[in-house]
Image (cartoon, rainbow, N blue to C red):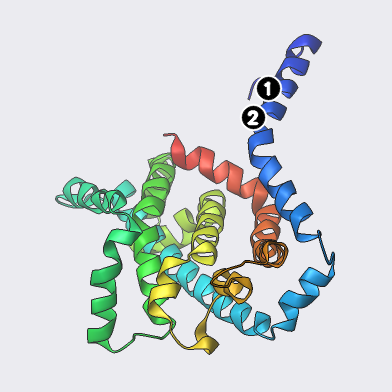
C-alpha cells in the first residue's frame, strides 16, 4: 500500500471519502431518528410487545447459519477445484455456473415454489435455506476462485512432495489461508440471507415460521401504516448484521480485495 504524505492531499482525500459516505449514511441516520419519533423508545417496546420477536429472530438465525454453512462448504471446495485442480472442462462448468448470476430471485419464485411442493418441504425452513444457498453460491465461488488463484502453487507442490493428496492439501494448506475470503463470504451470505424477504414471504405460511424481515407487517394496515414502529422494527432487524460486520471488518475488507483482484 502507498502512503500519502502531503497534508493537502490527505485533506482532499478525507473530504472526498466523506462526500462518498454521506449518501449511504443519511438513510441510516434517518431510520434511527425516525424510529425515535412519536412515542420514542416506546416504539421499540411496541415491537417487542408483539411477542413474536424471539421466534422471528430464532427462525432468521437458523436460516442464516444454515445458509452460511452450506455456502461456505460448497464454495471452498468448488473454488479449490476451479482454481487449483486440473479438471477436464472446468472452465465450461465455471461459466455455466456464472450464468446463474443473471437470473433474478423473483424470476425463480414460481419454479422454486413448485419444487418445494413436490419435495414436500413447503412451509418449512429448508424451503428457504436451500434456494438461498443456491442463489449465493455462484458469486461466492467467483470471489473464492480468484483468491485461490492468488495462492502460490509452490505450496501445493510442497504438500505433494510430503505425500499429501488433493484433499489433504486443501484441508491442511489451502483452507487455513482462506480466513480473509471466508470472512467476506460469511458477511455477504449473512446479509443476503438475513435480509431476504421474497422467499420467506412465499415459502413460509405458519406464523411460528416467519422471519425478522416480515416483522414490519404487524404495523401495516390496509389504510394506514405506523411508520415509526416500522422503522423501529427495521433498526432491530439490522443490529445482528452491523455487529457481524464490525467483528469481521478487517478480514472482510481484505477478502473482498483479494477475491476481486488476481
- Label 1 belongs to which residue? 16
Q: Residue at x 69, y 34 (%)?
A: 22
Binning the other alpha carbons within 10 Å of mark 1 as few (below 14), some (14 to 19) or many (20 upward) gives: few
Tag 2–tag 1 contact (CB < 8 Å): yes
Depicted 106 relative to depicted 43: above or below = above
Whole-percent x and y of residue 153? 38, 42
Q: Nearer the viewer, residue 260 or 167?
A: 260
Q: Nearer the viewer, residue 227 or 67?
A: 227
Q: Residue furthest front?
A: 223
State which quadrant residue 56 falls in: bottom right
Q: Let me know if residue 73 appears in the view.
A: no
Regarding mark 1 in the picture, which secondary structure is present there? helix
Whole-percent x and y of residue 102? 28, 48
Disc 2 from disc 1: Cα separation: 6 Å
State which quadrant residue 187 falls in: bottom right
Whole-percent x and y of residue 39? 83, 67
Q: Residue at x 30, y 67 (%)?
A: 109
- Label 2 belongs to which residue? 20
Q: Residue at x 29, y 50 (%)?
A: 82
Amino acid at each position: 500500500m502507498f502512503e500519502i504524505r502531503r497534508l493537502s492531499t490527505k485533506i482532499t482525500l478525507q473530504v472526498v471519502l466523506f462526500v462518498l459516505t454521506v449518501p449511504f449514511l443519511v438513510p441510516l441516520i434517518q431510520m434511527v431518528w425516525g424510529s425515535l419519533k412519536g412515542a420514542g423508545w416506546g416504539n421499540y417496546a411496541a415491537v417487542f410487545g408483539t411477542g413474536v420477536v424471539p421466534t422471528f429472530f430464532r427462525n432468521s438465525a437458523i436460516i442464516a447459519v444454515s445458509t452460511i454453512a452450506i455456502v461456505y462448504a460448497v464454495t471452498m471446495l468448488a473454488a479449490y477445484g476451479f482454481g487449483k485442480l486440473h479438471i477436464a472442462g472446468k472452465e465450461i462448468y465455471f461459466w455455466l455456473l456464472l450464468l446463474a448470476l443473471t437470473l433474478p430471485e423473483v424470476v425463480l419464485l414460481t419454479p422454486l415454489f413448485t419444487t418445494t411442493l413436490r419435495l414436500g418441504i413447503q412451509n418449512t425452513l429448508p424451503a428457504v435455506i436451500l434456494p438461498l444457498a443456491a442463489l449465493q453460491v455462484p458469486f461466492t465461488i467467483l470471489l473464492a476462485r480468484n483468491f485461490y488463484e492468488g495462492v502460490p502453487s509452490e505450496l501445493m507442490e510442497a504438500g505433494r512432495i510430503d505425500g499429501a493428496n488433493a484433499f489433504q492439501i486443501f484441508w491442511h494448506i489451502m483452507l487455513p489461508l482462506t480466513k480473509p475470503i471466508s470472512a467476506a463470504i460469511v458477511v455477504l451470505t449473512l446479509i443476503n440471507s438475513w435480509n431476504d424477504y421474497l422467499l420467506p414471504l412465499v415459502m413460509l405460511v405458519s406464523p411460528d415460521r416467519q422471519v425478522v424481515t416480515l416483522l414490519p407487517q404487524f404495523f401495516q394496515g390496509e389504510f394506514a401504516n405506523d411508520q415509526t414502529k416500522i422503522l423501529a422494527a427495521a433498526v432491530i432487524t439490522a443490529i445482528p448484521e452491523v455487529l457481524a460486520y464490525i467483528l469481521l471488518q478487517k478480514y472482510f475488507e481484505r477478502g473482498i480485495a483479494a477475491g476481486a483482484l488476481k
